[in-house]
Amino acid sequence: MLVYQDLISGDELLSDSFPYKEIENGILWEVAGKWVVKGAVNVDIGANPSAEGGGEDEGVDDQAVKVVDIVDTFRLQEQPAFDKKQFVAYIKKYIKNLTPKLASEKQESFKKNIEGATKFLLSKLKDLQFFVGESMHDDGTVVFAYYKDGATDPTFLYLAYGLKEVKC
């Protein structure tokens, strides 16, 4: 199994269990999320509660909750929305922090293509949700989510150059 960690914070943000599609010259990865129900597992142990004096839901307080699989799996923390000024400031700081961590050939590609990816994200800014890794590191990679036209499940966008592949 492959896990993708944030190069800056070290948080696990994605794994190969969630296939991605490269967009914006490979700067962004697009990953389909899914709403899933967590909890409320009905286990039939073969006992007859009515014969044993038990009620229908005796002693169990199952709470089924709907969660987005990627957010739940990687314990992503939602952040307040960015306005355009905040977003541009974040991207500038992110580029400054990430570039030295990249190999020289990746630095060139990153610098060449990040502007297009930034424009793509800016065009969707009002529709984006913002997530960071579990550590909530200020300078780490932000994961973006939005709903495509008519979709009921979110699509996540990752800044691919900010991820490091780790074999588990």
Image (cartoon, rainbow, N blue to C red):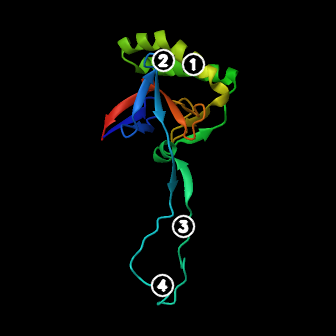
Q: Which amino acid does label 1 sit on?
A: Phe
Q: Give how far apart the Cα atoms at labels 4 and 3 are.
A: 17 Å
In-front residue for pair 61/47: 47
Q: Residues within 10 Å of mark 3 (few under 14, many from 20)?
A: few
Q: Nearer the viewer, mark 4 or mark 1?
A: 4
Q: Where is residue 111 in the image (x, y as percent from the top left)?
A: 47, 11
Query: At 51% across and 33% down in the image, what residue appears?
Result: 156
Q: How crowded is mark 4: few (under 14 residues within 10 Å), some or many (20 or more)?
A: few
Q: Mark 3 points at which residue?
A: 62
Image coordinates for residue 155, horizontal then vertical, percent: 52, 34
* Residue neighbourhood size for the residue with mark 1, other residues' Cα within 10 Å, grouped as few (<14), some (14–19), many (≥20): some
Mark earlier in primary sequence (2, 4): 2
As drawn, the label of residue 49 is 4
* Amino acid at the residue labelled 2: Glu
Percent position of residue 99, x then y: 46, 17
Which residue is disc 1 drawn over? 120
- Looking at the image, which residue sits at the far front? 150
Kindly report the distance in space between the C-alpha atoms of the residues bearing marks 3 and 2: 43 Å
Q: Are marks 2 and 1 in contact (CB under 8 Å)?
A: yes
Query: Between tags 4 and 3, which lies in front?
Result: 4
The image shows residue 110, relative to residue 138, as above or below, that is above
69 vs 104, left or right, is right
- First in sequence: mark 3 vs mark 1: 3
Mark carried by residue 24: 2
